[in-house]
Image: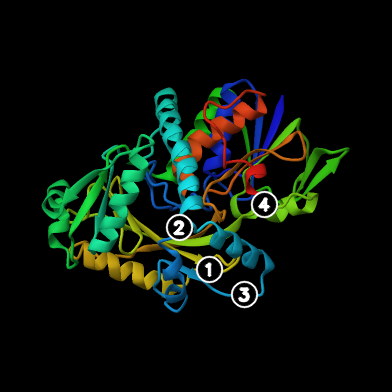
Amino acid sequence: MKIAILGSGLLGVTTAYELARRGAEVVVLDRQSTSGAETSYANGGQLSYSHAEPWANAAVLPKLPGWMLRSDAPLVLRPRADWQMMRWGLGFLRNCTPARADSNCVNMLRLGLYSRQKMAQLRAATNIAFDFSATGVLHIFSTQHEFEHARRQNDFQAKFGCNQKVLTREQCLEMEPTLAYTDRILIGGMHADMDECGDAYMFCNNLAAHIAEKYGVQFRYGVSIDRLVTEQNRMAAVKTSQGDVTADAFVMAMGSYAPLYLRQIGIDLPIYPMKGYSLTLNANEHCPNMSITDGTYKIVYSRLGDRLRIAGTAEFAGYNTKINEGRITPIMAAAKKLFPKADWQQEIKKWACLRPSTPTGAPILGRTRYPNLFLNSGRGTLGWTQAAGSAAIVADIMEGKTPEIMTLGLTLGDKK
């Protein structure tokens, strides 16, 4: 069976791995010159399986009006004459009720814990390098209100097999001594010991090289997709800059761009791009050695070998990928206060990406109205975290098998 995967980011490459190791003939198409060159390129680095609270929740609802007036807010919605954005926004608001937020959290946590299992299996089977670390993620808090909210969320998730350790300020400093130099108030934290981190771009390319050599997966780079072609209620081909590509089955893994192509053939995905930013610098002895999530500023820090990756913010501004210095500045300011002795004089690499986000926060996996077209998209900030599990689920569905976990809330039918 020949399968064409559209997109060579984290989801495309892990899906190619799953299908190829099961015996499929796989070709992967991507407009860039390498795998993982867009959304996966310089992400926050965290494999945060325990992070399952969706953006859409009751606690965030009263903050939205104030955030819309602040350029340094964790989430910025820039009003535009864009029907897709308005519709997405209404869906987001509908999911801010406690009941919906809890349901979406459970669905994402189930996928996250499964992805942790599948990632461990993948690492054992391939032995690829990607600056992997399994020291967990330390969540830190500067206000009692934020700390209490996180503890309540932890109590809820503990019912489903995910329990983080609550820490005092002193225990946080013991776990990550570089925090002792911070200019910030630090009242306590939580340690997600099941979480991990690693370089997603390195992972994509090393896994792509591994499956190309071991299973003969073809990676066709520099191929731009023009449109999808259907015949007699099936996907027939993909028209590209290098001619038509045909296959027995197709997997859409093009992230934020998936809805633009799928609308051509009558499939409407509730996905909208959420822009995120990151900074990468050479780490010195005063940079954290473990991955950290700042609960106040919604910024993550990941040590990737000799580099420090800093990432954060969510900005809804359409398909604009340009770096907005107004969004970079508050990330930099927060990082300098948290780690004032890091080397801030060096040249720091800045980056922005479009994260494919759904109103529920959960991805869209599996079948479409076309029996040979399948979806793997819509994870927002959790693409790295959920990649391995999502790929296994999609591969199972394509083989006609029942996935190993329940897919409630994770399919296109659940989004309607």
- The reply to whether discs 2 and 3 touch (Cβ–Cβ < 8 Å) is no
Query: Whole-percent x and y of residue 331?
Result: 35, 67
Element on which disc 2 rests: loop
- Classed neighbour count for the residue bearing mark 4: other residues with Cα under 10 Å, few (<14), some (14–19), many (≥20): some
Q: How far apart are marks 1 and 3 (CA)?
A: 17 Å
Q: What residue type is labelled 3?
A: Arg
Most extreme residue toward the bottom, as rendered? 69
Q: How far apart are marks 2 and 1 (CA)?
A: 29 Å
1 vs 3, front mark: 3
Q: In this view, does 397 lie above or below 411?
A: above
Please name whichever residue, 287 or 158, is drawn nearer the observer in this view of the structure.
158
Q: Distance between the residues labelled 2 and 3?
A: 23 Å
2 vs 3, front mark: 2
Element on which disc 3 rests: loop
Badge 4 or badge 1: first in the primary sequence = 4
Element on which disc 4 rests: loop
- Classed neighbour count for the residue bearing mark 2: other residues with Cα under 10 Å, few (<14), some (14–19), many (≥20): many
Please name whichever residue, 155 or 403, is drawn nearer the observer in this view of the structure.
155
Badge 1 or badge 3: first in the primary sequence = 3
Q: Which mark is residue 322?
A: 1
- The reply to whether discs 1 and 3 touch (Cβ–Cβ < 8 Å) is no
Q: Which amino acid does label 4 sit on?
A: Leu
Q: Which amino acid does label 1 sit on?
A: Lys
Q: Residue 57 carries which label?
A: 2
Query: Whole-percent x and y of residue 341?
Result: 17, 63
Residue 260: quadrant of the picture: bottom right
2 vs 1, front mark: 2
Q: How far apart are marks 2 and 4 (CA)?
A: 21 Å
